[in-house]
């Protein structure tokens, strides 16, 4: 009998869950963003200004977002893909072209972030946050100058090194150290990168994702590969930490706002993108998240804060000159995945 | 079965069709096709290369060891609890074992990271006693610990639920016939509890073989197991065909393991019937 009641409860819960999304008169905007990538109060502001309801959901990787859209069971109006993913989605007709007239605040965006090869002329996307990939290190433990990826292969730091558990970033680092392009599709170059990563494995404490933030703040490791925005946060929490972008070059990444083909309310979605480009909103977001704002006025304002006055938040032109964006490498991504599997399975 | 019963059963049949049969069919379709949608055995062929076989063997090995440890730890616990005379005390102990499971699985696994880390509780304690620090996190040992910790209740409960139902008169009769406590346990209690043990082993082994959260958190992503491989193929590499093939191979192995266990269970039951 207990079992029957249990099952009935489960069915009832499910039914409530399914019918819970009842209709209301206000327009709805479905926003799909990275986790902790917005100041949540701006959503309420947008709702009030436009008399609508924002349904906000999170994802953890570009791929997760891509496959959810691809499966056709999504109804998102706004997404935040990165550079190479935008290129891929444009190729596959998954993004709607933007009507720039509806986005006057585009003028606030730093011109050097516009018209990048992954989306020429910004027909489909508007920059939101951007940054670099670099090394976050503990200045108490690492006294030498950190200016090369090779320090991640230095045996003096055995089991004190954290790598990012991401095929593009980790293989990209090995490629950069070897002097190759981080977008390489040359099998020989990739094999050399593979050997280098296997060689490094005994020195690596762990291949991590977001845990890297807590671990570096807690002094669990001496060196870690991080995105600049995470470095900003870590350094504000632990003043022994410093950030460097190696001389061999690195990745400059862009997370842009775009409207996917699943959108049923393009007008409201464009209003939202314009809203996100507004100076006050951009500033709120960057102050909350710690990632570098694509809005030049917000960036200037934020850089006045001590925690934001560094090369992680505001990289010099010199650093940016040696950084490249990821490109969509198409089917070749399978080789990257294969190599990354082999590295992680190596004993 | 009368008509009413059949009507009542319909929702469950529909449920199983939609949520169990259909996904498995899809898995099959994906694993036997390639990118262009044509029939292909390529996915299986590429799975049977040394690197993936090693991942598979490593997963089976870790799952096997953790099942053995769970059994060695879980059986005595279940036995001791079942032997407590007061029902109230018994329920309290059971509650204590289930209590951690009220907390989210991820949280429980994360908390081990705080305990085992370089500046974690254990190493800080060692340091305070001026003992050398240990590398506790990010190795197979940590993965094993995570598996045993998370899956131990799945071993204890089935064994307990069988042990508690065994008629105490069997043991008394065995004693009357001259068996000492050890003989009674080996010849009566343990054989009677085999069904619980089988369920326990299945319930620990299956999630242990397929887990991907524990190795990526406690293993530091350095011990790639079959679950991680599948996750990586589906979420990062976007190769659903190969990922499905790997899932199918894993499911087949689990099915075979369960069949072997069931057969073992049946022979045991037959033996017991003969004994009775």
Image (cartoon, coloured by chain):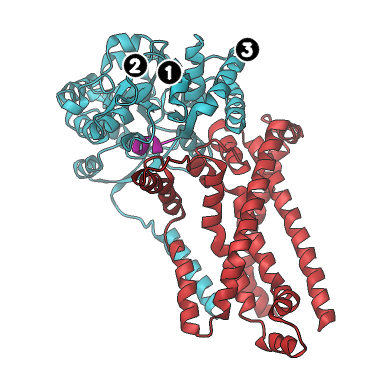
**Front-most of residues A343 and A82:** A343
Q: Which residue is mark 1?
A: A151
Q: Quadrant of the C terminus of chain A?
A: top right
The chain painted cyan is: A
Instruction: State the residue at coordinates (32%, 19%).
Output: A143
| Circles 1 and 2: CB atoms closer than 8 Å | yes
Front of the two marks 1 and 2 = 2
Q: Is residue A3 above or below residue A335?
A: below
Q: Which residue is mark 3?
A: A188
Residue A107 falls left or right of residue A62: left
Which residue occupies the extreme front position in the image? Answer: B130
| Lower sequence index among marks 1 and 2 | 2
- Chain letter of mark 3 equals A
- Chain letter of mark 1 equals A
Kind of element beneath mark 2? loop
Q: Which residue is mark 2?
A: A144
Crowding near the residue tagged with mark 1, few <14, some 14–19, many ≥20 C-alpha atoms within 10 Å? some
Bounds of the magenta segment:
A209-215
Total residue callouts: 3
The chain painted red is: B
The image quarter containing residue A259 is top left
Residue B67 shows up from this direction? yes
Distance between mark 2 and mark 3 Cα atoms: 33 Å
Instruction: State the residue at coordinates (30%, 26%).
Output: A140
**Front-most of residues A302 and B149:** B149
């Amino acid at each position: 009998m207990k079992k029957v009641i249990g099952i009935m409860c489960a069915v009832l819960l499910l039914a409530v869950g399914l019918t819970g999304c009842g209709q209301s008169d206000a327009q709805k905007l479905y926003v799909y963003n990275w986790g902790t990538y917005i100041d949540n109060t701006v959503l309420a502001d947008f709702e009030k200004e436009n008399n609508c309801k924002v349904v906000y959901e999170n994802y953890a990787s570009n791929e997760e977002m891509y496959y959810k859209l691809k499966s056709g069971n999504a109804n998102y109006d706004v997404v935040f893909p990165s550079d190479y993913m935008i290129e891929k989605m444009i190729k596959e007709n998954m993004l709607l072209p933007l009507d720039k007239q509806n986005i006057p605040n585009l003028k606030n965006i730093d011109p050097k972030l516009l018209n990048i090869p992954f989306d020429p002329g910004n027909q489909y996307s508007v920059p939101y946050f951007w940054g670099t990939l670099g090394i976050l290190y503990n200045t108490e433990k690492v006294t030498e100058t950190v200016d090369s990826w090779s320090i991640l292969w230095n045996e003096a730091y055995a089991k004190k090194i954290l790598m990012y558990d991401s095929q593009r970033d980790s293989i990209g680092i090995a490629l950069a150290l070897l002097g190759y392009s981080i977008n390489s599709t040359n099998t020989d170059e990739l094999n050399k990168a593979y050997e280098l990563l296997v060689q490094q494995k005994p020195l690596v404490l762990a291949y991590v994702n977001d845990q890297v933030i807590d671990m570096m703040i807690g002094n669990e490791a001496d060196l870690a590969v991080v995105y600049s925005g995470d470095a900003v946060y870590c350094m504000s929490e632990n003043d022994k930490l410093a950030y460097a972008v190696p001389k061999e070059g690195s990745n400059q990444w862009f997370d842009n706002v775009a409207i996917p083909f699943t959108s049923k309310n393009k007008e409201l979605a464009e209003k939202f993108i314009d809203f996100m480009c507004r100076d006050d909103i951009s500033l709120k977001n960057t102050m909350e998240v710690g990632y570098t704002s694509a809005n030049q006025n917000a960036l200037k304002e934020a850089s006045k804060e001590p925690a934001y006055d560094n090369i992680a938040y505001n990289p010099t032109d010199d650093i940016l000159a040696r950084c490249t964006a990821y490109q969509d490498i198409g089917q070749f991504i399978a080789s990257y995945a294969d190599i990354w599997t082999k590295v992680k399975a190596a004993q | 079965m009368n008509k009413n019963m059949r009507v009542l059963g319909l929702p469950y049949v529909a449920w199983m069709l939609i949520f169990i049969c259909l996904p498995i069919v899809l898995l099959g379709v994906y694993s036997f096709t390639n990118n262009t949608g044509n029939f292909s055995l390529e996915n299986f062929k590429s799975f049977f290369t040394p690197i993936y076989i090693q991942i598979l063997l490593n997963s089976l090995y870790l799952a096997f060891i953790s099942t053995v440890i769970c059994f060695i730890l879980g059986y005595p616990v279940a036995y001791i609890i079942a032997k407590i005379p007061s029902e109230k005390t018994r329920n309290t102990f059971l509650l204590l074992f289930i209590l951690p499971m009220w907390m989210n699985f991820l949280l429980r696994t994360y908390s081990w990271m705080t305990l085992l880390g370089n500046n974690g509780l254990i190493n800080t304690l060692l340091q305070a006693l001026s003992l050398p620090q240990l590398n506790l996190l990010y190795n197979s040992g940590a993965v094993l610990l995570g598996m045993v910790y998370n899956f131990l209740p799945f071993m204890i409960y089935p064994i307990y639920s069988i042990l508690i139902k065994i008629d105490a008169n069997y043991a008394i009769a065995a004693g009357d016939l001259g068996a000492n406590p050890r003989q009674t346990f080996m010849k009566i209690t343990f054989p009677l509890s085999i069904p619980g043990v089988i369920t326990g082993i299945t319930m620990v082994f299956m999630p242990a073989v397929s887990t991907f959260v524990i190795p990526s958190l406690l293993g530091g992503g350095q011990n790639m197991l079959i679950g991680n491989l599948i996750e990586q193929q589906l979420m990062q590499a976007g190769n659903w065909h190969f990922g499905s093939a790997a899932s199918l191979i894993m499911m087949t192995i689990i099915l075979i393991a369960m069949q072997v266990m069931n057969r073992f269970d049946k022979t045991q039951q037959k033996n017991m019937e003969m004994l009775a």
